Image (spheres, coloured by chain):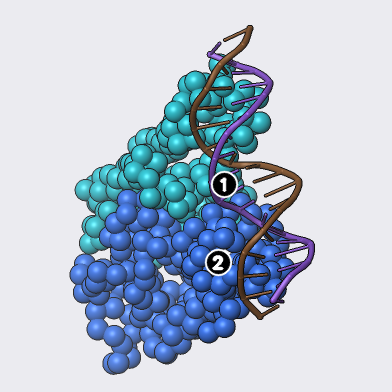
Chain colours: A blue, B cyan, C purple, D brown
DNA sequence: GTCTATACCCCGATAGAC
DNA sequence: GTCTATCGGGGTATAGAC
């Protein structure tokens, strides 16, 4: 791992933990073990390095979303798998947290990759919903984009609630809640290979256990 | 308004806009028009002033929640009123945003008022849901706390999505989505004064228009 | 109570040797 | 490419006059 990569990795971690205004170049140098000179050789400055680090974090997020959403199947189960993916809840979302940073929001170069990543995830979720609606798995009276937005927002808000109380369980409850609500969209099917327990009025109080992580 | 109040008000605004690590005492002094000496006369320092300011912001939030939730009525409509309250979406949540601040999360005195405020709102929402379930207005197969957590998380996550793209509409979509999902919990009633259009399978594509603010 | 002056440190960036 | 030295500025807090 060369100096440039070490700098990006260290900045990516610090952006996740402390945000942009909370991260100083010297902290990046300490964590990466790289010297001052390397930073300003490979990058124009803090902001330039941060853009590279945000894009690195974004790719981690996109890869995880792809891994949980790509396998085809019943739309509800695809969303469930996405929502129940193992997450480091108390650490927060490495991209979502940046939306609370004043410098990120007021600097186009910093905000753009954040916006694009969240938009991509939302649209990917919306495709899952729309596909499910087209197949008759889900009620199609609700716009797919609104369902997708609610799902992603619940996840992002779950981080907020969990971090506030420093209890991962607070995120789990929100996710379980939105999953229960999503089951209200599931339509009955004559299809014999429909997942068990997905008939609409059943709210599966504890069938799909979220486990310790949510 | 005396110096002390001006300091608290200025710090409260800056915590909302820039968070704790992003706010310096000198910025507070500039905004409040108060001198350096007053700050360190009335408060032990930045952290002490921030605690007072967080509690001021918390009270604003609790008052707004009380105002939208207290009026009795159908549980779904109470939640809808809470979710559709006029909000300064792009500014974010004056309490929720602090959960993304590294110093707030690692300092008990700063985190406690944040945690207590969000917990109070969540529990208040859960009471609304539980009351609705007891009255037969809402399906009681889903734990009230999980529904409340999902509602609050959607709101908090809505700020994240809206700030990322700098479009208030991104929050509106999430709120509309969770409202549509909540309507799946509404139970039919023989009661003649039941709100129109709340029969379960109906997803009211556009009846309850969220307006420009969400 | 409020003011100005000052201390000390770290921030983000640059210079120039190697 | 990477190092150390250094810069100007601002952060947080204290001192002491008024």
**Residue at 38% over, 85% down:** A74
Q: Which mark is residue A100?
A: none
SS type, badge 2? helix
Q: Is residue B36 visible?
A: yes
SS type, badge 1? loop
Q: Residues within 10 Å of mark 2 (few under 14, many from 20)?
A: some
Q: Is residue A113 left or right of residue A131?
A: right
Q: Which of the 4 image quarters holds residue A186?
A: bottom left
- Determine if marks 1 and 2 fall on one subunit: no
Q: Chain of mark 2?
A: A
Percent position of residue C12, x then y: 66, 57
**Residue at 40% over, 63% down:** A91
Q: Toward the viewer: C13 or B106?
A: C13
Percent position of residue B13, x then y: 57, 36
Q: Against B84, is A104 above or below?
A: below
Q: Chain of mark 1?
A: B
Q: Against A145, is B13 above or below?
A: above
Q: Residues within 10 Å of mark 1 (few under 14, many from 20)?
A: some
Which quadrant of the rendered structure holds the C terminus of chain A? bottom left
Residue designated by label 2: A29
Q: Against A104, is A62 above or below?
A: below
Q: Is residue A159 left or right of residue A47?
A: left
Distance between mark 1 and mark 2 Cα atoms: 21 Å
Residue designated by label 1: B22
Q: Is residue B73 left or right of residue D15?
A: left
């Amino acid at each position: 791992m060369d100096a440039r990569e070490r700098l990006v990795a260290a900045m990516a971690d610090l952006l996740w933990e402390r945000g942009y205004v909370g991260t100083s170049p010297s902290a990046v140098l300490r964590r990466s073990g790289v010297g001052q000179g390397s930073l300003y050789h490979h990058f124009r400055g803090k902001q330039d390095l941060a853009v590279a680090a945000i894009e690195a974090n974004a790719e981690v997020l996109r890869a995880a979303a792809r891994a949980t959403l790509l396998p085809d199947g019943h739309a509800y189960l695809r969303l469930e798998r996405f929502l129940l993916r193992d997450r480091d809840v108390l650490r927060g979302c490495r991209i979502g947290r940046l939306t609370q940073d004043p410098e990120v929001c007021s600097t186009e170069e910093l905000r753009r990759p954040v916006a694009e990543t969240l938009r991509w995830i939302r649209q990917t979720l919306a495709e899952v919903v729309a596909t499910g609606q087209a197949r008759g798995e889900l009620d199609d009276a609700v716009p797919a984009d609104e369902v997708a937005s609610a799902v992603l927002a619940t996840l992002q808000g779950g981080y907020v609630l969990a971090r506030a109380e420093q209890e991962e369980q607070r995120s789990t409850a929100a996710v379980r809640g939105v999953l229960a609500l999503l089951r209200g969209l599931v339509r009955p099917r004559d299809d014999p290979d429909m997942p068990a327990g997905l008939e609409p009025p059943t709210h599966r109080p504890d069938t799909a256990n979220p486990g310790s992580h949510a």
